[in-house]
Each structure stands twice: as C-alpha cells, then as structure tokens.
Image: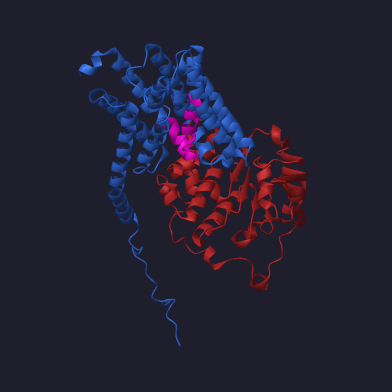
Chain colours: A red, B blue
Amino acid sequence: MTKDDEMTTGEPVLAMRGVRAELGGRPVLRGIDLTVRRGEVVALLGANGSGKSTAIRSVIGQVPVSAGEIELFGAERRAFRDWWRIGYVPQRTTAAGGVPATVTEIVSSGRLSRTRFGLFRKADHAAVRHALELVGMADRARDNVEALSGGQHQRVLIARALVAEPELLVMDEPMAGVDLASQEILAATLREQVAQGATVLLVLHELGPLEPLIDRAVVLRDGCVLHDGPPPRAVGQHALPGHDHVHPHEHTPQRTGLLN
Amino acid sequence: MELLDFAFMQRALVAAVLVGVTAPAIGIYLVQRRQPLMGDGIGHVAMTGVGLGFLLNTSPVWMATAVSVLGSVLMELIRWYGRTRGDIALAMLFYGGMAGGVMFVNLAPGGSNANLSSYLFGSLSTVSPSDVTAISILAAFVVVVTLGLRRQLFAVSQDEEFARVTGLPVRALNLLTAVTAAVTVTVAMRVVGLILVSALMVVPVAAAQQLTRSFTATLAIATALGVTVTISGTVTSYYQDVPPGATIVLLTIAAFLLLTALAAPLARRRARAAAARRPAGDPPECAIPATRGAADEVGV
C-alpha cells in the first residue's frame, strides 16, 4: 500500500464536521470540516485571526463549540477518555506559572494521563528522561524553565507532549519564536515521530523547515476552509529546479552536542 | 520552657504548627495560578460565618468554614461564567461578606465588634479545646489534598489548557483548590486572624522562591518557613504580649527580605557554576567571528 492509499483509507483519528464556534459573540469558526487520518501530517495554515488556533482549541475542549461534531479516535469528543493518545503542544505563552518549576517537573505533568491517581512508577520516570533525550534537553532536566531560551522552552513543551507516548500530536505554532538550532532539533524530533507512525496536526504560520514532512495543508480564512490538499507550492528560491528541500545544515553535526 | 505548662499555650502552639504547614501548602498553588489574593477574599467572606456563629450561638469556626467554602465555590463559578463582570462580582462578594459579619455580630445578643476582633487579628488565649479539634480535622484535609494531589494541582495551576488534554478533571480540581483555600483560612483564623491569613499563604512562598529553582523545593522551604514563623511568632507574642497575627506576618516579611538579600550572591554563584560546566570552546563573552567582520564595519 502506498502512502497515498493510506491517506484516503487510513482510519480517521480526528474528524471535525461543520464545527462552528464564537468568541465574545463573534463567529470565529463558521463550519469547519477537517479529517486527519492515521499516519498523516496535516498543517493548518492561515493568516492571523483566520481561526486556526481556535480550531485546534475546540478539538481539545478549551473553546466551546456551538454547532457541529468533533470525533477523536472514533469517539464523540465529550465521551473521549483515552487522553494519553493525544500529545498537545499549546502556544508557549499559555504555560507560565507564578512559582519556579524545573524542566523535569513540567515534562512530568504530561505523563499524568498514563498514571493512576498521579502515582509515578519507574516506567514513568524513565519516560520523562527519554522524552527529554528526544528533544535534547536531558542536561537541563533540573534547571528552572524560566532560565531557558524561547527555543529550549518550546522543546520542553514538546517533550511534555511526547512523554505520554501519544498517537496523535496536536501542535499550535511549534516554530514561533524558536531559534534556528532549536528549529532543527524540533524538525528532527518530529521526523522521528512521523517515521514511527505518529499522526500530526499542526498550526503553522509558514511551512518553514517542516515543509518536507507535511502531507496535506488545510488553509483557513475567516473561519472557513479555503483549501484542503497538497501543501501550497513553494515560491521564490524554493521553487527553482533542483531545490529538493535538502538543506545543507541538515547533515552537519549538531554544534550544540545536545542530541549526542 | 515554662510556656508549655499552660494548656492554652499548648493549644495555641498546636494551632500555630498546623497553620504554618497548611497556609503555604495551599498558598503555593494560588501563587502558581497568579491568584495570590484569593485567600484575602475568602477571609473577608469568612467574617459572615463568624458573625452567623455568634448570632446562632454555634461554633464560629465551623460556621466560618461552611460560609467560606460556599464563598469559594461561588468565586470559582464567577471565574468560569462571569468573564466580563467577574471583578465587580468578586468585589461585591468580598465586601458583602465583611459587612455581613459586622451586621450579624451586632445582631447577636450582647454582641459587639469587640467579639470579632480576636477572629480578625488572631488571639492565643482564646483557642479552645474544641477549636483545636476542629483545626486539626481541617488541617488534615488540607494536607491530604495539597500533598496527595500535588502532581494534579501542579499541572492544573501551571497550564490549565494542557491539563485538560491530559484528561484531568480541570474544573473539579479548580473547585477543590478553592475549597481547600477556604478551609485553610478557617484553620488559620484563630491564630493569625482573617485579615492577615492571606499573608501566610503568599509571603512564605514568595520568600522560598528567592532561593529555589523547582516547585518541590519551593513547597518544602515555604512550609518549613511557615512553621518557623508561626512558632516563633506565637512564642514572641506570649513573652512580649503583642498580637500573634501581626507578629507572625512581620516575621514572615522579615524572612522574605533576608532571603531576598541572600538570593543575589547565590544567583551569582550559580551563574559561575553554569559557566564552568559549559564546554571550553564556548566563548564566555560576546565575540564576533573573525571571518565575518563586524556588522557595523561599513566600507564607504
């Protein structure tokens, strides 16, 4: 079975049908249809205010839906209980508490969906260490998250999403405000997850370094789906013949040494 | 220690230890949620409970617990539903609670504002044996919630949106936090007083933060500091004949200032240690790579 067949026949892990939502009385989603099938990497694109973040936040129940249906892994969203199957990376601004917290403490909270009554076993501690290794932050495990750069903070939030070993990754602008070195590590982490069969839905402002990974792009405008299909064609230098998205720095050794 | 010969001092010290543990233990989540003044609001509402206790001739501690738990649930509901007018509704709840307390006390037979005073500012000699029983039961509840559910409460207080996606019952945990804060207010009421209780929830946490990098360490240092100041404040209050609540709060603020002064050298030492850990090839200062030339080197 080729990848294309998979895309049309794979079981849907996320389905939105006619979803509408209002924020402060203003319609933000005006009937969104979106299906993500197992193994797909789908980018949600659109200008600021087009509703892409609201669409994602309606899926996780953070934004109330006024009409339409949302299904997760075949279950109606309200009846869905297997939350460990979803790894969520919110926009970085939402995750700031008023008390210091270490990288390990933040990542551990992502493992709660796999524990009973919040009791951690050996496997849970091991999963936290492994998730930090995946994003190259194992050496910062005991540091205060406030002491990290924007890109490092984003890697911690991705580790927090990965620590439950989810099947579907939902990410809201994972590359926003992230330095180049961290972007490369994030792209590599995501590539690895996709190779292992993860399904990904991500909100992006621009395709950027994740472009080669993306199977399908859904473009929103004013709360409606404008385009659902192959990613928008590259323009400018990216469209030149011979430009096959192999960036030269992809194969140079990581200067930070964090991944080794 | 002659002060331990007095039964009322034994009771006051037991209450002081319980307050010292519970107030920072719930306060840390309020600080983490950036609602440090919530305890203050609940303290105002609890006054109505104290007043009702006098009026109905029942235990003011249990009455205050009931009313402040109700008030905290109401505050949480206002936070969910009343996004736009939430602040106004909270203000009405706080001042209505305070006014209700004064009104009920004065309606009680032979009651006057003087009866309220020991609840407002704390008092050692008035902690009765039944108060100690009530405070111990309530404190046990607070400890079980704040320590037993610390991973869940941490997750919800740190990032509510993410906590929802881990399947945690976010609303139930928010309600539980509010109710636990209300219970803590009534635990602390007899020793520190309703007006000053919020200080003991917030200031030890703020003081601990000056030194710590982790939530766990902040929680440990804040409760240790809480117990230290409540015991030393209670003892000072006995020997110097000064009000315990005010003594405890002033000691807590002094501890905050002391730890803040200690924090700067500690931060410098940590920065040096971090610099020593960095690989040797990494330049310690800003340096422009020689091959590129400086950006402001403009050839004309």
Quarter-of-image position of residue A186 = bottom right
Q: Which residue occupies 49% across, 60% down?
A: A181
**Would you say residue B274 is visible in this rendering?**
yes
Instruction: Identify the magenta region.
Output: B24-47
Q: Residue B256 versus residue B146: which sits nearer the camera?
A: B256
Looking at the image, which residue is at 70% across and 32% down? A79
Picture quarter with the C terminus of chain B: bottom left
- Give how far across and how far down residue A211 sits, in percent: 64, 60
**Which residue is depicted at the point 59% across and 41% down?**
B161
**Residue sitting nearer the eye, A65 or B19:** B19
Residue A60 position in % (x across, y down): 65, 41
Q: Is residue A162 left or right of residue B252?
A: right
- Is residue B34 highlighted in magenta? yes
The quarter of the image holding the N terminus of chain B is top left
**B182, above or below A260, in the image:** above
Q: Nearer the viewer, residue A156 or B6?
A: B6
Residue A146 is one of the magenta-drawn residues: no
In-image side of B229 versus A145 (left or right): left
Q: Is residue A10 visible?
A: no
- Mostly what secondary structure, the magenta segment? helix
Q: Residue furthest bottom?
A: B300
Residue B52 in percent (x, y) is at 51, 18
Taking the spot 29% from the left edge, 48% from the top edge, the residue there is B266
